[in-house]
Image (cartoon, rainbow, N blue to C red):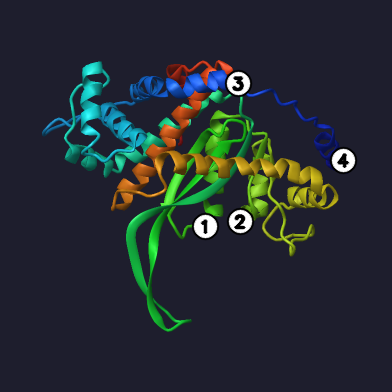
Amino acid sequence: MGEVQSTFNYFKQEAEEPKEAFNWSSYNASQMREKVFFVRLLRELCDLITEPKHQRGRKPRSMGDTIYALGLKTYLLLSSRRSCGDVKLSQKAGYVKKEYHFNTLLKYLNNPDIINVLKELIEISAMPLKQVESDFAIDATGFCVSRFVRYFDVRYGMNTKIRIFRKCHAVCGTKTNIITSADVTPGPTHDSKKFEGLVIATSRNFSVKEISADKGYLSKKNYNIVKDLGGTAFIPFKESSTGKAKVGGNSYVWRQMFKFFKENKEEFYKHYNKRQNIESCWSMIKARFGMNLRCKKDIAQDNEILLKILCHNICILIQEIFLNNIEVDFKQCEKDHVAHK
């Protein structure tokens, strides 16, 4: 009981940090110069990509140049055809070696090899804020596509249709809304299935103190995962939940947090409410880069979503450069980055 009581006392004694006045002058400067910084930071990230070995046949385009062109297209909210002019301007500025035909962009957008590259770039792009973020939130959201599926509704006895969507699962820092790890699945995938992978991926490069999640992630396994990583999970319990669970392995953390939830609800929700930042994060991404996907194939849709997240992270970094004088050194971040096994 001593360990439990000390945990409760820690949360009770944790004082709120006073909020400083927002620096609108620096924020305005970050927005006015965002595009200039964006193309430079995107190029620096793409320079980290290791080009695949070419064995025979026609030599493919540079992976770094291709992802740069796709990232620029996503940032500018342009179709592949309309983005060709901006890619040509980037060629003149020295950011890419050759201009791209729009069909070439579409072909590479449907390349499954780009998915893992984008996931790694997202993780590296978040690492300049490693010293800032220690509390995180996890959730998933859907992105609409232009396809529908027809089915017979037994309840109403009629044919109907439903829009297909892709689901993006992600962990974000609760101070800056930077996304530290992400994955994309078909729409029906349950949120909790991606909890372990995303939280562990974040813990490889960040010190995880807290993880906030909604009731969809409630399980003893998820509580234990965060505990093993040295942090505390704040997942609210359901009305049917009890502190006497014995099924599914070690339930000590479950009982501990259930007691904390029942006896200190106000304090519990103070930490849990940090989860609102992941909702803000999804709102920022969809408002800025759109909630609908242009592509029709699943692989291209996954790449399109990951590109939106990468652009979001770069925009967050630019804002932090101006507001908090964050130094961005992607080469050092790459050296410190612990990749997926």
Q: Which numbered tag is attached to residue 5?
A: 4
Camera-side residue: 254 or 62? 62
The residue where tag 2 is placed is 216
Q: Nearer the viewer, mark 3 or mark 2?
A: 3
Mark 4 against mark 3, which lies toward the viewer? 3
**Dot 3: what SS?**
loop
Instruction: Of the two numbered discs 1 and 2 on the same chain, state the one appearing first in sequence.
Output: 1
How much space separates mark 3 and mark 1, taking CA atoms?
Answer: 40 Å
Could you tell me which residue is drawn at 61 percent across and 37 percent down?
136
What amino acid is found at the position of numbered circle 4 in the picture?
Answer: Gln
Helix, strand or loop at label 1? It is loop
Which residue corresponds to mark 3? 23
Please say if 88 is above or below 160.
above
Left or right position of 116 against 64 = right
Q: Amino acid at mark 3?
A: Asn
- Mark number for residue 190? 1
Residue 18: x, y in percent? 75, 25
**Count of labels in the image:** 4
Amino acid at dot 2: Gly
Q: Nearer the viewer, residue 189 or 246?
A: 189
Q: Earlier in the sequence, mark 2 or mark 4?
A: 4
Looking at the picture, how far across and down is residue 192, in whole percent?
56, 53
Circle 4: element type = helix
User: Mark 3 or mark 1: which is in front?
Assistant: 3
Task: Bin the neighbour count of mark 3 within 10 Å (Cα to Cα): few under 14, some 14-19, many 20 and up.
Answer: few
